[in-house]
Amino acid sequence: MPYRCFVLLAVALMTAPSLAAQSDAAGRIDRLLDAPPFDRAGWGVILMDADGREIYARNADRLFVPASNNKLVVAAAASVLLPPDYRVVTSVYGTGPLTDGLLDGDLVIYGRGDPTFSERCYGADTLAVGACDSLWTRMDLLADRIVATGVRQVAGSIVGDGSHFDANLVHPAWEKYDVNWWYAAPVSGLGFNDNSVNVTWAPGPAVHAPAAVTFEPDLGIFRFENRTRTVPAGERRTIDFFRVPGTTDIWAEGTVPVNYGERTEYFALPDPNSYFAAALRAALASRGVSIAGPTVSTTDSLRYAHARRSAPLVDFDSRSLADMIYPILNSSQNWFAEMLLKTVGRQVEGAGSWRAGLAAERRFLIDSVGIDSTAFALSDGSGLSSGNLITPRAFAQLLAYMLRHPGGAGFMRAMPRSGEKGSLRNRFVDTPLEGRVLAKTGSIFRVQTLTGYIERPGQTPLVFSVMANSYVGRYSAMMAVIDSVVVEMGRGR
């Protein structure tokens, strides 16, 4: 049954005569949570007003795995702890003199965690001037800035220096298979195209032919083997992509039915600093700049420290902090969340690491928001790790705090709205809450969560968190139950 039908059926059941005796919202919510097959799930639910008065709660002080609801924490912490005009600066240095267009040394690009060298839109109005970037928009701008300094030749190498962050690029709690994909891309001081390559595949021209596989950008930095096969229509699609760990040796294997449509996936690359340098090299080459040496990367903060003591050739600003937060909440972009977490760690705790970022988040939640220190235990920024734990009440307290905080405008702008562009586009449609729910989704294996606000005409919003752990059943059915619970919350008593 389609998702919308599940929601409408649940709403219809709540008004059926057999439930007429359930006169208040609490009874109707309880009936939904206690209905098979999801009565066996672990449920944590809270609804309160913006002043913290509890309206409904079930297990609201127990710890749950939040999945991508975890992104609410890093987005809120960055909104409050970083200056509202904060921008990441990427600097370009030369290790030798620039004379008559020749840089007699290496060209070093020192990244400080700008995630916005990527293709995406940073607002709901995608037609607004400057709202969207192509894959090469910001890389081309950086290349233009370098050319404007007079650089025409580089005698040495082009270096991607990501040492502003630590050398731990992949979170230890992430699954081995996941680190091949965009949602677990490595996190360093430099990043291009979400540290992923766009892999487009389609059936070959005939049965038994290899599938057609193309890459964007294709910078010649990896070796690819196509071990796939096109099969007759109606057979199973099994194509998948793999990498020798820590290398750029990639292969595809499996089958693609001959009548299958084209699809694009996003494969993570292991060395983001080399990837960025290779992309900039290509952009400079298209502008007639030659580089005699190889493409080099480093996470050693001492290796080019001497270059950073000189004046930079270029300082290149990122998009705004609000723009960095937007894809984290609106479309649940994992890599942006992890980049921002390390940025918060570097700016607040002095180290661009997961440990420092989590320490800054912890102090923020306890000291600023007033959340009990035992109500959360966080592992990463995106929620990909199942080691993240937090209570529904802690989430509700955080959202109530952001509603009041003067630095919360970018946070609120980034929250997906039901029925509009973002992760709630297809949720709450044709219900009384269409257009009135602002909420962050979350989903990993056997976990589904939704935390946000319910807008009320002429009143302050309600704050809610619904967290389901350890459930067995279809994703769409669980999502429908959660949405029906939120509809009941919006209906009130």
Image (tube, grey):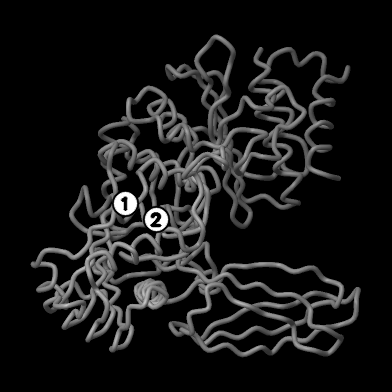
Residue at image location 69% in from the left, 90% down from the top: 227
Residue 98 falls left or right of residue 375: left
- Whole-angstrom CA distance, mark 1 to mark 2, is 7 Å
Q: Quadrant of residue 76?
A: top left
Q: Residue at x 34, y 57 (%)?
A: 114
Residue drawn at x 39%, y 55% as measured from the top left:
379
- Residue 99, horizontal then vertical, whole percent: 14, 78
Q: Residues within 10 Å of mark 2 (few under 14, many from 20)?
A: many
Position of the N terminus, as image quadrant, is top right
Q: Is residue 457 left or right of residue 426?
A: left
**402 to 205, vertically: above or below:** above
Q: Position of residue 199 (x, y in %)?
A: 61, 73
Pointer 1 with pointer 2, Cβ within 8 A: yes
Label 1, residues with CA under 10 Å away: few <14, some 14-19, many ≥20: many
The residue that disc 2 covers is 379
**Residue 478 vs residue 38, the one in the foreground:** 478
Q: Mark 1 vs mark 2: which is more N-terminal?
A: 1
**Which residue is most to the top?**
458
How many labels were placed on the picture? Answer: 2
Nearer to us in this view, 97 or 347: 97
Residue 116 horizontal side relative to residue 297, left or right: right
Could you say where residue 330 lies in the image, as x and y percent from the top left? 53, 43
Specify the label residue 314 is tagged with. Answer: none
Q: Amino acid at mark 2?
A: Ser
Q: Secondary structure at mark 2?
A: loop
Q: Mark 1 highlights which residue?
A: 358
Q: Is residue 453 above or below residue 174?
A: above
Q: Which residue lies most toward the front here?
A: 100
Which amino acid type corresponds to the residue marked 1 in the rendered image? Leu
